[in-house]
Amino acid sequence: MSTLAIIAIVVAVLVVLAIVVSMARRTKHQREFGQAQVEAKHDDARHHRGRAEERRTEAAVAEERAKRAEVEAKLDEEKAARREQELDREN
């Protein structure tokens, strides 16, 4: 075989090898990128769950405050009624 043919075969093998290595790197990069995206989506979901829980807690606190305010309003009404009765008795 001539030297030129051997050189052409070696160059062709090196080109094919470079292409294979390039494809392997690209595949690895895409896989890592995909894993990073999946992890980011999981983080996003956890964040939204946390926010939902915070809002539920805030709603429960607001509901409790509303109940307390209602009870205080009823108590104030009762106090006002008693005062009016006392005033009516004194007159």
Image (cartoon, helix red, strand yellow):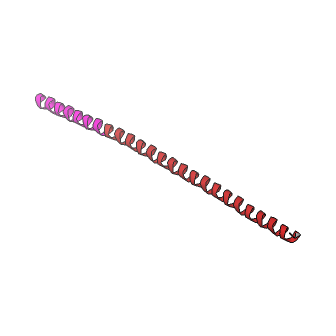
Residue 84 found in image quarter: top left
Q: Residue at x 48, y 45 (%)?
A: 46
Q: Residue at x 29, y 35 (%)?
A: 68
Closer to the camera in the image, 77 or 55: 55
> Is 54 drawn above or below residue 14 in the view shown?
above
Residue 59 found in image quarter: top left
> Residue farthest to the right?
3
Per the rendered image, the range of residues in magenta is 66-91
Q: Position of residue 47 (x, y in %)?
A: 48, 46
Quadrant of the rendering where the C terminus is positioned:
top left
Closer to the camera in the image, 49 or 35: 35
Count every numbered label the image shows and give the total: 0
Q: Residue at x 36, y 38 (%)?
A: 61
Quadrant of the rendering where the N terminus is positioned:
bottom right
Q: Is residue 86 magenta?
A: yes
> Is 36 drawn above or below residue 4 in the view shown?
above
Q: Position of residue 71 (x, y in %)?
A: 25, 34
> Is 57 drawn above or below residue 18 in the view shown?
above
Judge left or right: residue 60 versus residue 77.
Answer: right
> Is 66 drawn above or below residue 24 in the view shown?
above
Q: Position of residue 40 (x, y in %)?
A: 54, 50
Judge left or right: residue 58 versus residue 44.
Answer: left
Closer to the camera in the image, 86 or 36: 36
State the predominant SS element of the stretch in magenta.
helix
Closer to the camera in the image, 64 or 39: 39
